[in-house]
Amino acid sequence: MTEDGAMLLARLYDGNRGLLEGLVLDPAADQFVRDAALDAYVRLAQDGVAPREVIRAFIERLFAELPRQENFIWIGVTNAVSALGFADLAPAVKQLFDDDLADIAFMEYGEFEDDLAAARRGEFPNRYDRGSPLERMRGWIYGEDVPEPSESRATLLADMAALAGLDGIGQAVNEYRDVGRNAPCPCGSGKKFKKCCLPKVEAGLL
């Protein structure tokens, strides 16, 4: 779920911003799940589904309200600022690095500047995947009783629930062992591996 969480949350978004914002703000939620929720919000803004001014106000709220302690959510905030091209928020991001809140193992300030400049030039990729969440989830399991995808949201949610109870999980394989830290992430997000799935791999979540 952590690998594809942003895509799934964005794809199933029903207009209730409070749910996404609440998950990002929840200190009890897993830091990578919070990052996925924020990334979903960014994708929705990139696609014009959520207003940019609304997510900008939310990002400013995160700078003001989140505890000033190291957490992967700060990498998510950094990615959000760069992906949406909010250049005037760069000083706030710089302060995150100066205060050691954004872990340079996953991103350095120079990389943030490069991403921000690319977004300002219109070259930053829109990572909002419009594919079916069910199709992505089919890759999580091995078995023959996988329901065919449906584009109906109600049916889709029911199918996803059905998938959760299937047997036949295959043997785990470390598919990331040959991926370099600065290589494109295999999940297809468009981010570098170290800025996307690497921290989840190191935490044993993938």
Image (spheres, rainbow, N blue to C red):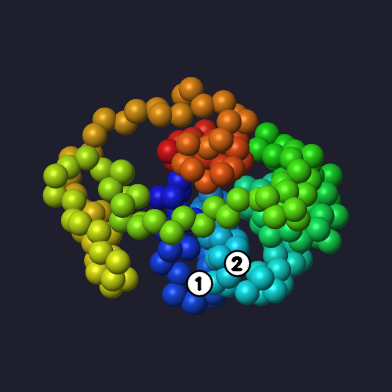
Q: Few, some or many C-alpha atoms within 10 Å of disc 2 (few <14, some 14-19, many ≥20)?
A: many
Q: Residue at x 79, y 46 (%)?
A: 113
Q: Nearer the viewer, residue 150 or 195?
A: 150
On residue 19, the disc is 1
Instruction: Name the mark on residue 45.
Output: 2
> In the shown orientation, is residue 74 left or right of residue 11?
right
Residue 135: % across, % down: 31, 52
Question: In the picture provided, is 89 more to the left or to the right than 27?
Answer: right
**Label 1, label 2: how far apart the Cα atoms are:** 16 Å
- Residue at 79% of width from left, 52% of height from top? 93
Please tell me how crowded label 1 is: few (under 14), some (14-19), or many (20+) other residues with Cα within 10 Å: few
Specify which label sits upstream in the sequence, 1 or 2.
1
- For label 1, the SS is helix
Furthest residue toward top: 178
Q: Is residue 17 visible?
A: yes
User: Which circle, 1 or 2, is nearer the viewer?
Assistant: 2
Viewer-proximal residue among 63 and 131:
131
Asked if marks 1 and 2 touch (Cβ < 8 Å), the reply is no
Q: Position of residue 36 (x, y in %)?
A: 53, 55
Taking the view exactly as shown, the residue that stands out farthest to the front is 122
Helix, strand or loop at mark 2: helix
* Quarter residue 58 falls in: bottom right
Residue 206 placement (x, y as % from top left): 43, 38
Position of 19 with respect to 74 (left or right) is: left
Vertical placement of residue 138 versus 38, above or below = above
Give the residue type that dot 1 points to.
Leu
* Quarter of the image where one finds residue 77: bottom right
Q: Position of residue 140 (x, y in %)?
A: 31, 44
| Residue 74 sits above or below residue 108 on the image | below
Identify which amino acid the numbered label 2 is placed on.
Ala
